[in-house]
Image (cartoon, rainbow, N blue to C red):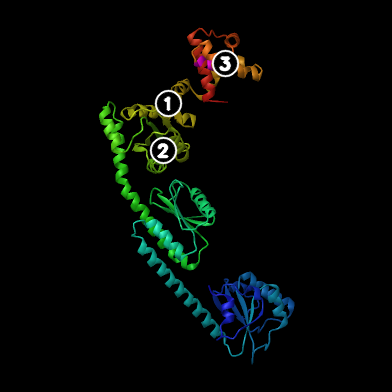
Amino acid sequence: MLTVADVAAASTLGLSVAAGADGLQREVTSAHVSELTAPGDWLRGGELLMTVGLVLPMELAECRAYVSECAQAGVAALALGLGHGLPYKSCPEPLRIAAQECSVPLLTVPDETPFIAITKWVFAAIAAQERAHLQRAMEINRRLTAVATSSAPLAALLLAWSESSATPCVVCDSTGRLVGATPVTPADVVRRALQAASACPPDQTSWAMVGEFEVHTVGATVPLARIMLSADMDSTSRSSSTVLVSLIALDIERRDLSGRAERERRSQVFTQLLRPGIKRERAQQLAAAVGLDAAYYQVAVVAADDVDALAFRLQSGLESALLRVIGGTVEVAHPDLTALMDALQTHAAGLPSGIGAPTAPDTLAVSAMQARSLVPVSARLGRIVTASEGATVSLLLSLGSPDAVRGFADAVLAPMDQLDPRERLELVRTLEQWLRVNGAWDPAAARLSLHRNTVRNRIDRIAQLTGRRLDDGDDRMELWLALKARAALPQ
């Protein structure tokens, strides 16, 4: 960057600083001559504006107006020509005062220095700096290219970049997990970069500016990774950043391509394991072939419009999972229900999702069948539904619309709704636990930490309020369904 200080220090020009010394670090982008008293419309910012003050009234008010307009237009500095045959042989005091007040550097040009010499010097210096920047950028590019074929290209590229540029670079996968960062990058910078990546839409595949970072997405159709570069970089780093991003993207896409065959093989094994009636010995062989060593797995089925993008995100979040795409759904088998639920909530939020019961590898078809049947139920409820709750919820929903289900629950439980809230809560809790143990008094009393007679009294009270005979199976079922209805579709 060429500054006013650089121009003022040029020995061949012989310029002097008359005012505004605190602005000498302003960047000079060009040199321009104008004798206009209102030159603002002709300026673009960064100019070293030269004048002899031919028509400028050297009164303080006029000088203030002139310098203020130049400052608003973004001039880097003013240069006043002095000497023989010119209006002024020394710097007029009103102009010097105005420049000092506006913090605009004011240089004086001696008689022996023509304005054209300053113009040529400025543009020659800018060109020299640009050549130097280009040479440094080419050297950085050569270093980056040289390490791109190493055994660990990403780490080598980040190291080479850190040795050549002060611009931090952070790389994360499509799920937002940190993959790599330039050495000694502060932890808070890495954290902010990951936050910038997470702010991008999951399906974004273009460049974006997020806060203080440039976010470059790797992947033409499905995001594979994101590369975050601090936007505050010098011209040399900016010239080389495209090469860095391209080489990192090339390494990531190469690794994705090399892993695609393995993912396809695991998908085919998953398909075979889902065949009904597969023999246990064959299922064990297939499971061992892809490293499945857990005793039980549950299958999740998710419906989505963009199944390929969803499949990639789930695969990235569940590296040990079996996964396949069937029509408009993604099917996943995983041994850890908690991890599976977390992945669905993170990468398939709002999508209809069902999870079957845990089964051995030779009976995965059962879990998959359950999960598929729960997808419509999940669409109605707006949340993930598991097999442990699916049968009851499905039955409740089959009764009709949510309003009809709530109406049924209210009709059955309304007598208890009129009670004091504390008494109602005690009765509802007692009824639920008693029904869970199929009307057995002692187990219900143990669950509630009550005496069995207290449980009997409460159940008799419920029978009186609701008009249900609790020794009748149909009446018990109605109460149980009403409780489940309220749990599934709360007000």
Of the pair 147 and 232, the residue shown nearer to us? 147
| Cα distance between the residues tagged 1 and 3 | 25 Å
Q: Nearer the viewer, mark 1 or mark 3?
A: 3
Specify whether residue 255 is in view: yes
**Residue 387: which numbered mark, if any?**
1
Image position, residue 238 (x, y; %): 47, 64
Image position, residue 381 (x, y; %): 49, 29
Tell me the crowding category of disc 1: few under 14, some 14 to 19, or many 20 or more residues within 10 angstroms, Cα based: some
> Measuring 37% from the left and 31% from the top, which residue is drawn there?
297
If the image is split into quadrants, where does the C terminus sit?
top right
Left or right: residue 168 versus residue 419 is left
Tell me the crowding category of disc 2: few under 14, some 14 to 19, or many 20 or more residues within 10 angstroms, Cα based: some
> Measuring 35% from the left and 26% from the top, which residue is drawn there?
366
Image position, residue 200 (x, y; %): 49, 49
First in sequence, mark 2 or 1: give its number. Answer: 2
Of the pair 36 and 7, the residue shown nearer to us? 7
Left or right: residue 41 versus residue 280 is right
| Cα distance between the residues tagged 2 and 1 | 20 Å
Left or right: residue 322 versus residue 389 is left
Q: Nearer the viewer, mark 3 or mark 2?
A: 3
SS class, disc 1: helix
* Residue at the spot of label 3: 430
| Cα distance between the residues tagged 3 and 2 | 41 Å
- Badge 3 vs badge 2, beta-carbon distance below 8 Å: no
Q: Amino acid at mark 3?
A: Thr
First in sequence, mark 3 or 2: give its number. Answer: 2
Does 431 lie within the magenta span? Answer: yes
Q: Amino acid at mark 1?
A: Ala
Quarter residue 69 falls in: bottom right
Q: Nearer the viewer, mark 2 or mark 1?
A: 1
* Residue at the spot of label 2: 304
In magenta, the rendered stretch is 430-436
